[in-house]
Image (cartoon, rainbow, N blue to C red):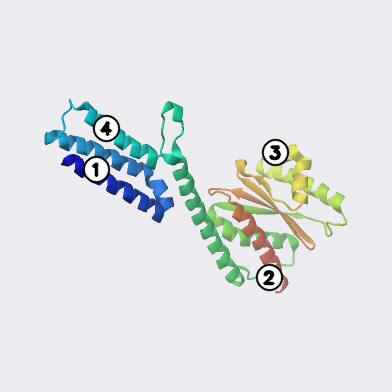
């Protein structure tokens, strides 16, 4: 009788497992470890109850072996199907890597959404951030830094701007490359980096308006080329982590400041 009840419980477990997977696959993958614990808890509990009620005898090893094989089959065929890591050694592992990947993706999504919200708020209220516009170029650079660091401070970052004193990039390419090299040397001195070791390669990246990532050291360098106002923006990770979306937002904030102040 108890064996029949246990079989019914296993059937309900299999059906519930399938419905759970169909309804919420992401949450299902995260919960597999708990489902396996539940399956083996049901198995051990059924054995112990059977022994207490004298429905099962330890001498009936064939029956116990059948139950164990049934539970093991359910575990392998249903719960562990996507994550048999080493078949020939019979080493089975629940999808821990999948769980970590899903959790990290959700955390990254949430962090991006917070940043998008901050960016949206700054665009809508740009006038409240920019009160006075200086005509001095150095002061404008400092004011721009103050503006974009309103964004950076919220996420443990800091941005410093380096001005490239050249008017026409297209007609003065050789001079522009020289300025990029000199600015990289200055960035090396200021931050203790080694960008000059791959000088020409890094210059090519920035010359092509691409982002130069030094994320292993917590830095990202953005080229921002505007008419007569060309900059390199160095994003430094202070307490937070630099995301790719930060490069997009900070570049847009620089353009926003430049465009907004031209109309004042």
Is the residue under label 3 in contact with that under label 1 (CB below 8 Å)? Answer: no
**How far apart are the two marked residues, 2 and 4, measured between alpha carbons?**
76 Å
Residue on which the image places disc 2: 260
Taking the spot 74% from the left edge, 44% from the top edge, the residue there is 202
Give the CA separation, mark 3 to mark 2.
36 Å
First reached walking from the N terminus: tag 4 or tag 1: 1
Image quadrant holding the C terminus, namely bottom right
Label 3: which secondary element:
loop
Q: Secondary structure at mark 1?
A: helix
Rendered image: mark on residue 7: 1
The relative height of residue 35 versus residue 91 in the rendered view (above or below) is: below
| Residue drawn at x 66%, y 70% as measured from the top left | 132
Q: Give the side of residue 27 with respect to residue 151, left or right.
A: left
Real-space CA distance between mark 2 and mark 1, rounded to the nearest whole angstrom = 72 Å
Q: Nearer the viewer, mark 1 or mark 3?
A: 1
Q: Could you say which disc has been placed on residue 194 in the image?
A: 3
- The residue indicated by pointer 4 is 66
């Amino acid at each position: 009788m108890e064996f029949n009840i246990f079989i019914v419980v296993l059937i309900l477990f299999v059906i519930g497992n399938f419905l759970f997977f169909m309804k919420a696959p992401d949450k299902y993958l995260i919960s597999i470890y708990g489902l396996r614990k539940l399956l083996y808890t049901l198995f051990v509990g059924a054995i112990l109850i059977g022994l207490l009620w004298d429905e099962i005898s330890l001498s009936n090893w064939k029956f116990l072996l059948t139950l164990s094989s049934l539970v093991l089959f359910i575990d392998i065929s249903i719960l562990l199907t996507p994550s048999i890591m080493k078949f020939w050694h019979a080493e089975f592992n629940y999808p821990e890597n999948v769980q970590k990947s899903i959790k990290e993706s959700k955390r990254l999504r949430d962090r991006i959404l917070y940043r998008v919200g901050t960016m949206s708020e700054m665009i809508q209220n740009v006038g409240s951030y920019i009160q006075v516009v200086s005509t001095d170029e150095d002061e404008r650079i400092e004011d721009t830094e103050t503006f974009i660091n309103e964004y950076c401070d919220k996420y443990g970052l800091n941005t410093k701007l380096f001005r490239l004193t050249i008017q026409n990039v297209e007609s003065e390419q050789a001079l522009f490359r020289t300025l990029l090299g000199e600015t990289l040397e200055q960035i090396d001195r200021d931050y203790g980096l080694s960008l000059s070791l791959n000088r020409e390669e890094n210059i090519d990246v920035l010359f092509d308006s691409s982002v130069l990532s030094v994320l292993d050291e917590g830095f990202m360098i953005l080229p921002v080329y505007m008419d007569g106002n060309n900059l390199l923006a160095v994003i430094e990770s202070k307490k937070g982590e630099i995301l790719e979306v930060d490069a997009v937002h900070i570049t847009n904030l620089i353009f926003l400041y430049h465009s907004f102040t031209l109309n004042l």
